[in-house]
Image: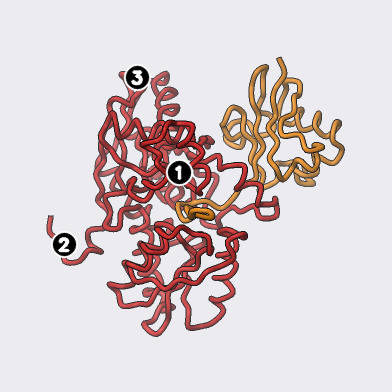
Amino acid sequence: MKYKSILDAIGQTPLVQVPSLSPADNVRIWVKLEGQNPTGSVKDRVALALIEAGEASGELTKDRIVLEPTSGNTGVSLAMVCSIRGYRFTAVMPDNASAERVSLLRAFGADIVYSEGAKGTNGSVALAQEMARDDKYHMPFQYGNEANVTAHYNGTGREIIDDLPEVKAFVAGLGTGGTLTGVGRRLKEHDPAIKIIAAEPQLGELVYGLRSLEDGYVPPIFDPDILDGKVMVRARESIAWTRALLTREGIFAGISAGAVIWVAQRTAERLSSQGGGDVVCLLADAGWKYISTEAWTQDIDTAEEQVEAVLWW
Amino acid sequence: MPVAVRIPTVFRKFTSGESQVQVDPGTIGDLIGQLDNRYPGFKRQVLTDDGSLHRFVNVYVNDEDIRYIERLDTRATEGDTVSLLPSVAGGSDRLDDRGH
């Protein structure tokens, strides 16, 4: 395939069947490999949509700096899109983010502003919001920007229908809610009977311990009514199935992929008893950024501890 | 066999620090009532004034969110595990290595 720019190579990711992970003969599980996007995650779709929405509305001009609270995939994707489109990009991240994360973002050309580590992601969001009051910044804010949803409605969801119009269920991880809301809307327009199921991490006690209920957060773009089910997954199951993806199917995916596979299997079992069919799950990224957790190489108990010590979702 | 209810850190100040509490089987609404009898004020923490589930509280029966089953009418039977968890912002963006 030939593309005029790396931005044109975003999306159109492979949909691959994983027969060894199917719980019954009358159901098939397919994985959409978002790690095949240019910077290695589904967030390339979102970043491009966020920047194009800013340009289209006239809010994003060349003299403004794009600002986003992120130390993860969205930061890398925004840095890449901004460098091509000619914008400066500043990521706000907790000061205890790993050296690997910081280096990766810097490599992609991002400037970094640190927020207080003890306040976690919420602290980065608060600091970015404060900074964004200055007009020199343009903050797309993926948790509240409808472009996050439309990227999946116009891209991911459409691609799934093009490749597998008979799809009966879709499973993805719940983060910003952009994937589930956008793909969910598109699939339900195609066939209202398609089930949309969320996989959600059971984060380590440490993570919850730092938060009070007042810190509770439901992203504004997430439409909870689009879901037909939501299943919580532990780090242990997620690691086990991320490994199975690699050893049984040769697919090297990020750790959240295991959680999605685990939920896809439960979904497929139910579907099997209702006549069978096809389950699509979205694997948000590839495994490269998680190698330092040793999720694939340690015994499962140690791997679980290592993964729970980081925010793996 | 009773139903085990797992209590997250943010609610433990209402359960004398207990991280897991045993209750009798019933609907989730019943279970919250039982917990409120034992720990007065508990109900106010997880339900809103009109008696529905607080927006930032998720309740799971064997890992499935009751909002997508029968909400507070969802039944927990003998041997089930009920988990209460606050909802937190997610996304791979949160993958920052803590303290490393």
Chain letter for red, please.
A
Colour mode? by chain
Chain letter for orange, please.
B
Could you tell me which chain the residue with mark 1 belongs to?
Answer: A
Residue A51: name its quadrant: bottom left
When the figure is inspected, residue A150 is found, relative to residue B49, above or below; the finding is below
Could you tell me which chain the residue with mark 2 belongs to?
Answer: A
Q: Is residue A49 visible?
A: no
Q: What residue type is disc 1 on? A: Gly
Could you tell me which chain the residue with mark 3 belongs to?
Answer: A
Do marks 1 and 3 both belong to one polypeptide chain? yes
Residue count near mark 3 (Cα–Cα under 10 Å), binned few <14, some 14–19, many ≥20: some
Q: Residue A310: percent from the left, percent from the top?
A: 50, 48
When the figure is inspected, residue A119 is found, relative to residue B75, above or below; the finding is below
Q: Residue at coordinates 48% horizontally, 78% vertically from top-left?
A: A137
Q: What residue type is disc 2 on? A: Tyr
Q: Earlier in the sequence, mark 2 or mark 1?
A: 2
Residue A215: name its quadrant: bottom right
Q: What residue type is disc 3 on? A: Ala
Q: Residue A129: percent from the left, percent from the top?
A: 57, 71
Q: Residue A84: percent from the left, percent from the top?
A: 27, 72
Residue A193: name its quadrant: top left
- Helix, strand or loop at disc 3? loop
What residue does disc 3 label? A24
